[in-house]
Image (cartoon, rainbow, N blue to C red):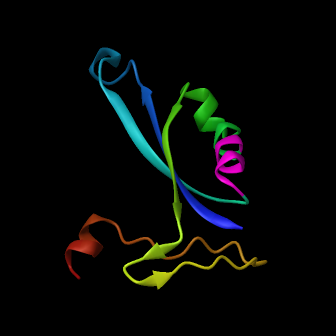
């Protein structure tokens, strides 16, 4: 299993009359880039917003550290620091 960053874009008519393309990154665990694409395309928000995929990158190394995915029964998404919390670091 590998970690992929899937860079998606979409147009939202509620923002700037739909002229601006909005981008998001999904991080997906998948066996291959093709599987990451299929998985991303199955997300409800992806379909709801008529998103498209601009690029897919396998994340295997970050600043000299190898990224290894290990299956877990935990569903903990990790700690999120919001604006004020991050600002105070």
Q: Quadrant of residue 49?
A: top right
**Is 68 situated left or right of 64 in this image?**
right
- The percent coordinates of residue 12 (x first, y second) are 41, 24
How many marks do you count on the picture?
Answer: 0
- The percent coordinates of residue 86 (x first, y second) are 27, 73
Which residue is pictured at 44% across the width and 34% down the height? Answer: 9
Which residue is pictured at 20% across the width and 79% down the height? Answer: 88
Tell me the chief SS of the magenta region.
helix
The vertical placement of 56 against 13, above or below, is: below
**Is 22 situated left or right of 78 in this image?**
left
The vertical placement of 86 against 18, above or below, is: below
- The percent coordinates of residue 13 (x first, y second) are 39, 18
Q: Quadrant of the C terminus?
A: bottom left
The vertical placement of 1 against 64, above or below, is: above
Q: Quadrant of the N terminus?
A: bottom right
Q: Quadrant of residue 22?
A: top left
63 part of magenta stretch: no
- The percent coordinates of residue 15 (x first, y second) are 32, 24
**Is 86 situated left or right of 32 in this image?**
left
**Is 16 situated left or right of 18 in this image?**
left
Which residue is pictured at 37% across the width and 72% down the height? Answer: 81
Q: Which residues are magenta?
A: 32-38
Q: Nearer the viewer, residue 31 or 21?
A: 31
């Amino acid at each position: 299993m590998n970690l992929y960053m899937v860079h998606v874009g979409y147009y939202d008519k509620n923002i700037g009359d739909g002229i601006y393309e909005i981008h998001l990154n999904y991080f997906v665990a998948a066996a291959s880039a093709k599987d990451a694409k299929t998985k991303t395309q199955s997300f409800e928000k992806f379909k709801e917003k008529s998103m498209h995929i601009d690029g897919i990158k396998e994340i295997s190394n970050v600043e000299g550290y190898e990224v290894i995915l290990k299956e877990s029964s935990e569903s903990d998404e990790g700690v999120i620091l919001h604006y004020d919390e991050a600002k105070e670091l």
